[in-house]
Image (cartoon, rainbow, N blue to C red):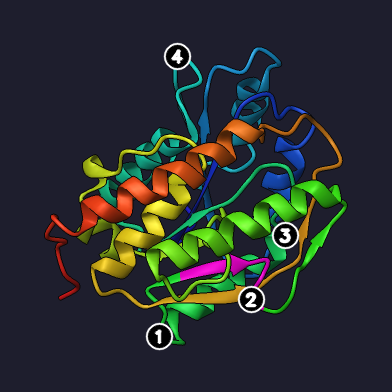
Amino acid sequence: MQLSDSLVIIPTYNERENIENIIRAVMGLEKSFHILVIEDNSPDGTAAIVKMLQKEFPGSLFIIERKEKSGLGTAYIAGFKWALEHSYEYIFEMDADFSHNPNDLPRLYRACSGQGGDVAVGSRYVSGVNVVNWPMGRVLMSWCASKYVRFITRMPIHDTTAGFVCYRREVLETIDLDRIRFKGYAFQIEMKFTACKSGFNVVEVPVIFINRELGTSKMNTSIFGEAVFGVLSMKIKSRFRNYPQKK
């Protein structure tokens, strides 16, 4: 069994066009990463592809199969708990569709392992707007949502909705994962906000986000609505909550 201190969590639903290529891309990196796929009962056979590849990557490719599509947040929480149980030191969030470049994984890893970060965010907006092949309306919606969240929460983060993230183990051990309430993409905001409130150092690593070429996007306006309207409630409630602190 190949040893690694790092686990990449990839939630999937109908990603048969991408899943084999993304797994091979991560496994082909010079730095060793393990992969945990959180599979939400895709009818297109995504799980079967992962299971086939497990024979090629024994001990480094894992899968959790869920009975239904239960939300991005719950998928990552399940993955975080699995990662902690299996003693990984660095735990990553990454999409299956190549919108997050696997070659950036080592950069996020170094930001946390050797450059002082507790959470490293692959940021689309820390150095301008680095998004390729998105319609202008969607770019503006995402950018404005991040600016709004930053204004309300006062987090020193430009890309508050980013889903390409590395966490040091201590962050996930300190945060009460069972109190994370958002299930959609606002989950990404809540995780960053909670990490900041707990005293962790959240850093941004500039990346280029490329819109998927294969498969169907899961993004819609209701997802952004959750992020925009839910964040105000989260901020208000935070004034009456004691957050566990970094040791």
Residue at mark 1: 116
Q: Are marks 4 and 2 in contact (CB under 8 Å)?
A: no
Q: Residue most toward the bottom?
A: 115
Indicate the secondary structure of the residue bearing disc 4: loop
How far apart marks 3 and 2 lie (CA) works out to: 17 Å
Could you tell me the amino acid type at mark 4? Lys
How far apart marks 4 and 1 lie (CA) works out to: 39 Å
Could you tell me the amino acid type at mark 3? Asn
Q: Residue 108 carries which label?
A: none
Residue at mark 2: 126
Q: Within the magenta stretch, is there residue 123? A: yes
Q: Where is residue 25 in the image (x, y as percent from the top left)?
A: 73, 53
Indicate the secondary structure of the residue bearing disc 2: loop
Q: Which of marks 1 and 2 is in front?
A: 2
Residue nearest the viewer, comparing 12 with 1: 12
Residue nearest the viewer, comparing 84 with 237: 237
Residue at mark 4: 67
- 126 sits to left or right of 202: right
Q: Within the magenta stretch, is there residue 47? A: no
Q: Which of marks 4 and 2 is nearer the N terminus?
A: 4
Q: Earlier in the sequence, mark 4 or mark 1?
A: 4
Q: Position of residue 106 (x, y in %)?
A: 60, 72
| Residue 59 in sight from this viewpoint | no
Residue nearest the viewer, comparing 134 with 83: 134
How far apart marks 1 and 2 lie (CA) works out to: 18 Å
Q: Residues within 10 Å of mark 3 (few under 14, many from 20)?
A: many
Residue at mark 3: 101
Which residue lies at the image location 36% right of the left edge and 78% below the top edge?
201
Start-end of magenta stretch: 120-126
How far apart marks 4 and 3 lie (CA) works out to: 29 Å
- 116 sits to left or right of 139: left
